[in-house]
Image: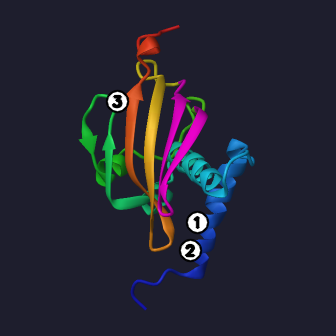
Amino acid sequence: MPGRISTSFICTIVLQALSAQAALGVGRQSGSSIQQEIIDLQKAFVAAQERGDADYVKNALADDFVQIETNGDSSGPKDLLKGIQPSQRSSPSPILYDFKVVELDQGCAVVTYNAVFAGNQLERYQHLSDTWVKQDGKWKLKFQQSTLNLWSAHDLD
């Protein structure tokens, strides 16, 4: 039947998310369950990007997703997806920390966090803000903005 998702497909997505969370050492922290759910989603999303899992990323994005990149340019889902390639692991995984979640309502939350991208010399330290919305009972990433941490933007060790 058109528009139906198979149980095996859903199980595959759930297992991939759980694997990504386990690989990142995602554990329970204090805070509301929706806050922890959003943090876990965010970590799983970044892990999927790192391992080059374009299907996971595509399924996590809202159709009208917008990204504001560190240089101020905006892009959409197609632009984000074309940059996703299976990982060759030439650089370490990013370090994600200092998560904060603001619930705007039951179906919308903004998560802010900091990241260190060790393999990226020019844009190593970033502040990120992502907006997640619930569509058809599933959380989707609708908006992302990345900002360079200016005190360290030109830090080359």
Residue 37 in magenta?
no
From the viewer's perspective, is 119 left or right of 3? right
Read off the magenta span.
95-118
- Residue drawn 37% across the image and 51% down it: 81
* Pointer 2 residue: 9
- Say the numbered circle drawn on residue 27: none
Label 2 close to label 1 by CB (< 8 Å):
yes
* Pointer 3 residue: 70
Residue 122 placement: quadrant: top left
Q: Secondary structure at mark 2?
A: helix
Residue ranking furthest to the front: 105
Q: Earlier in the sequence, mark 1 or mark 3?
A: 1
The image shows residue 23, relative to residue 106, as above or below, that is above
The image shows residue 150, relative to residue 29, as above or below, that is above
- Say the numbered circle drawn on residue 13: 1
Q: Secondary structure at mark 3?
A: loop
From the viewer's perspective, is 76 left or right of 39? left
Q: CA distance from mark 1 to mark 3?
A: 29 Å
Residue type at mark 1 is Ile
Q: Earlier in the sequence, mark 3 or mark 2?
A: 2
Label 2: how many Cα within 10 Å (few below 14, some 14–19, many 20+): few
**Residue 107 location, x and y as percent?**
47, 63
Residue type at mark 3 is Thr
Residue closer to the observer: 36 or 50: 36
Q: CA distance from mark 3 to mark 2?
A: 34 Å
